[in-house]
Image (cartoon, rainbow, N blue to C red):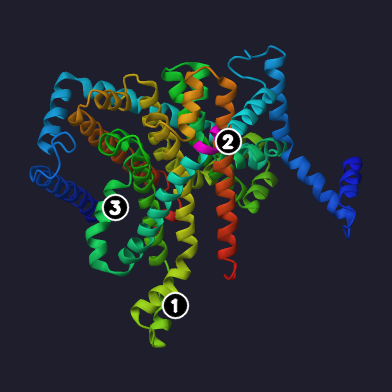
Amino acid sequence: MSRSATVVGAVKPKLDRPREKGTAVVNWLVRWFPLAILAITWEAAPRLGLVNPASLPPLSVVVAALGRLAMGGDLLANGLKSLFRLVCGLGLAILAGVPLGLTMAWFRPVRAVFGPLVRCLYPMPKSALIPVLLLWLGLGDLSKITLIFLGCLLPVLISTTNGVRGVEPAMIWSARSLGRSRLAALFGVALPAAMPDVLAGIRSALAMSFVLLVSSEYLMSRDGLGYLISFLGDGGAYDGMFAAVLVVSILGFAADRAFNAVSRRALAWRET
Amino acid sequence: MIGRLGRALEATGTVLVLLVVWHFVAASGAFSDFLLPSPEAVAARIIDDALSGDVFASLARTVVTALTGFAAAGLVGAALGIGMARVRLVRWFFDPLVSIGYPMPKIAFLPVFLLWIGPNFASQVTIVAFSAVFPVAVATRAGAEGVERTLLWSARSLGTSAGQLLWQIVLPAVVPQMLTGLQVALPVALITTIVAEMLTGGDGIGGAMLGAMRFADSPGVFAGIIVIAATGFVLIRTMEVIRRRMLRWHAEAAS
């Protein structure tokens, strides 16, 4: 324990209270050590012959394959393709879902018309749309973007509606009685107050978008990370396949963490 | 009761309106029969498949896959969540793994399971369980950590054993949150089942839809969508009913 603390202290000599910082680092190491166990097991099990190296290449081999994929440009080209689809699909879902959700929360007739439709379509597993979108829109970007848009729209819309409807009515009344118009109260009071729900909806849509992206690229694509995984797997290049699976997993995790950090910043003005 | 009847009427009305809109859009000729078959053609297709028993065979296969994976995720997730809340070693080991696994797109591991287990029922159930286990574990853990200390202290001071404490205090207190986790996990399980079936072929509805697509049989593809949408609707509504039934005793049901 103390050794790693001094080593870290030597790397960052300018710390005011090296001891406390050292403890923090040790805590961090202890917290994440299970991941190291997992990595060591991954490396050792195939090397020791506990599992067949063909079905689980050692971690170092996978990392080497990752380096080759990155150097060859395959990773970047397919990654950018996937990222483009994800950003378009999710972005459109947010651009459409938040205003629609607001309208549904604010105007009773709109809610009466679209509420049943939303409740009816929400439980449908959106991956069932993959074949029909392929028939309609082909193998390119458009079918994936549409799928992600459709899959993400309802979570964003529903959480926006619920958030706005859950806003303390007294807040709206105060704004109205202070002379704000209905619209000004909506955008100035209700929407900011509903922001935690809106962001939570977008966060679950973000997770959904990765699932739908990868699924549709497995099934109907000539590029993208999902395609790269299935292409490498079909070709028996399992080290590359594991590398691509690792990349997708890390991207999904990192996107969620980044979004979480941004939303915490965005909500920093709130008291809690 | 009126509320429930009203909801049933609302759902029926919505479906009818959608069918009418679909009928007129298809009849307008704006899209070819291949791109948008008429609802009549799709209904005929579903009835044909129902009479020959095909629909029920693939539906049963899909539902069994989804629910087996879902049940496994429920059991493992509940055990993991309670373990993480109550056993320090379990928490230490699984906390980083769960916090990384929770936001990760689990479907990326489907080819890995296919490689390890082969394109069969077992690999489909595995990927479904793997996808659905995280929400259950996280929600159950939150529930188990939120159990009121005074409840635990009183029970313990009255001489309750560790086992009784788990079964009679912790588990009932965890149920509401666990059900929330299960409600998040069920749609995930359905989505994953469909993708797994499409990718592995096989007999389920996902496989049937992909087969229909390959043969450019668009009524078959639409029939699959309808059947899956109806199944998802029924399963998710059933889950809501189960939740209400199970939580009659809980404060939540009073509101």
- Residue A145 visible in the picture: yes
Position of B246 with respect to A118 (left or right) is: right
Distance CA(mark 3)–CA(mark 2) = 34 Å
| Foreground pick, B134 / A215 | A215
Residue at position x 30%, y 37% in the image: A129
**Under tag 2, what secondary structure?**
helix
| Foreground pick, A105 / B87 | A105
The residue to which callout 3 is attached is A118
The reply to whether label 1 and label 2 mark residues of one chain is: yes
**First in sequence: mark 1 or mark 2?**
1
**First in sequence: mark 3 or mark 2?**
3
- Residue B181 visible in the picture: no
Check disc 1 and give the amino acid type: Met
Residue at position x 11%, y 33% in the image: B41
The magenta span reads: A73-78
Check disc 2 and give the amino acid type: Val
Please give the chain letter of the residue carrying mark 2: A
Q: Position of residue B197 (x, y in %)?
A: 37, 25
**Under tag 3, what secondary structure?**
helix
Task: Label the magenta part by its dominant secondary structure.
Answer: helix
Vertical placement of residue B147 versus A76, above or below: below
Q: Position of residue B193 (x, y in %)?
A: 39, 30
The residue to which callout 2 is attached is A247
Of badges 3 and 2, nearer the viewer stands: 2
Vertical placement of residue A213 versus A53, above or below: below
Residue at position x 60%, y 67% in the image: A268
Determine contact: label 1, label 3, CB under 8 Å: no
The residue to which callout 1 is attached is A171
